[in-house]
Amino acid sequence: MSRFSKFRPYLVQSFRNRVALLGGWVVFTPLLLHSVVGLTWGLTALASVGVLLVVALSITLSSYQRHQSKF
């Protein structure tokens, strides 16, 4: 049995609770970076993926820490 098999439901629930946050990052980050900062579309896409990864990792880590504190 996998070490993370008990953790998986908590992770899915955490992402479901934050769909609006992730959607906001996906929509507004490229618009802000391209129009306000003036990055090219390639750099905007790269930065948006980076921001999305950071948000996803922070959700994953906070969910894992919450799960660990319960057991």
Image (spheres, helix red, strand yellow):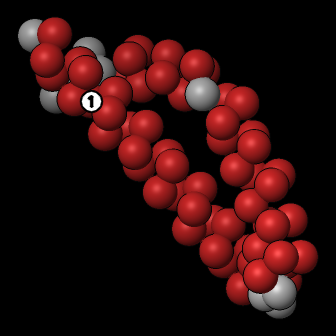
Task: Identify the residue at image location x=50%, y=16%.
Answer: 13
Type of the residue with mark 1: Tyr
Instruction: Name the spot of residue 14 as percent of width and height, x first.
Output: 48, 23
Decide: is 4 above or below 40: above
Task: Identify the residue at image location x=74%, y=61%.
Answer: 29
Q: Report the label total.
A: 1
Where does label 1 land, which residue?
A: 64
Instruction: Name the spot of residue 17 as percent of width and height, x first.
Output: 58, 19
Decide: is 66 above or below 40: above
Is 10 left or right of 21, judged from the image as shown? left
Image-quadrant location for residue 60: top left
Q: What crowding class fits label 1: few (fewer than 14 Cα within 10 Å), some (14-19), or many (20 or more)?
A: some
Secondary structure at numbered mark 1: helix
Image-quadrant location for residue 65: top left
Task: Identify the residue at image location x=10%, y=10%.
Answer: 71
Instruction: Name the spot of residue 55 as percent of width and height, x first.
Output: 51, 49
| Residue 48 can be seen, yes or no | yes
